[in-house]
Image: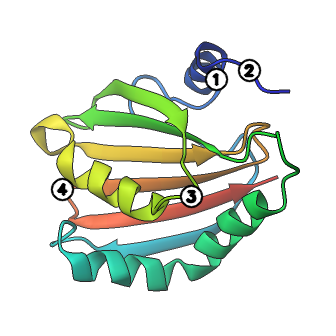
Amino acid sequence: MMKNFAFYENYIQTHFTKQDCGIDLKQIGKKTQEIYLSAVSIGQSHFYFEVRNRIKSIVDFLENSYSQKPPRQITRPLWYRINVSDQAINHYNGIGYLNMESDWLKFIIDYLETDRADQGGDTICVLFDLDFNWAICFTFSQKEKRLIIEKFQK
């Protein structure tokens, strides 16, 4: 059953944010994938294509998960965004449904590029299944100059 954004926001903040510094998705389940990409030029178009190629199994998983939903049912995962300023304080940026009918991966990469955390902190965008059976976390680390993509599943 679908709930409102306030419910999801509260649930995520209560169960997954860790002491005002980042996010911990181990409660969802096992980390089944972890991919690191050098992100010196995250805003460049070639970076987008590199990401898409390197995370093909995650893209396929997500797109297949939502192409099989019955009509009239929510056919989108949640996205949840925080910036971790100075690697010390979470700044909540928003929550919404990911539009699976547009280029959702470009949306995430553009978001990570254009709305960076203050003081060189991490920018995090997590995709959640509405029932929290899985999560896909995109973390742009300005300090390390890399994009980390992790998938967690029950």
Which residue bears the numbered disc 1?
Answer: 8
Pointer 2 local density, CA inside 10 Å: few below 14, some 14–19, many at least 20: few
User: In the rendered view, would you say 119 is above or below 101?
Assistant: above
**CA separation, marks 1 and 3?**
22 Å
Give the number of the mark in front: 2 or 4. Answer: 2
Mark 4 is on which residue type?
A: Lys
**CA separation, marks 4 and 1?**
30 Å
Which residue bears the numbered disc 2?
Answer: 3
Residue 75 is situated, as x and y percent measured from the top left of the image, at 72, 47
Q: Nearer the viewer, residue 120 or 109?
A: 109
Pointer 4 local density, CA inside 10 Å: few below 14, some 14–19, many at least 20: few
Give the number of the mark in front: 2 or 3. Answer: 3
Q: Earlier in the sequence, mark 2 or mark 3?
A: 2
**CA separation, marks 2 and 1?**
7 Å
Q: Nearer the viewer, residue 34 or 127?
A: 127
Count of picture labels: 4
Specify the farthest residue to the front: 71
Q: Is residue 22 visible?
A: no
Which residue bears the numbered disc 3?
Answer: 101
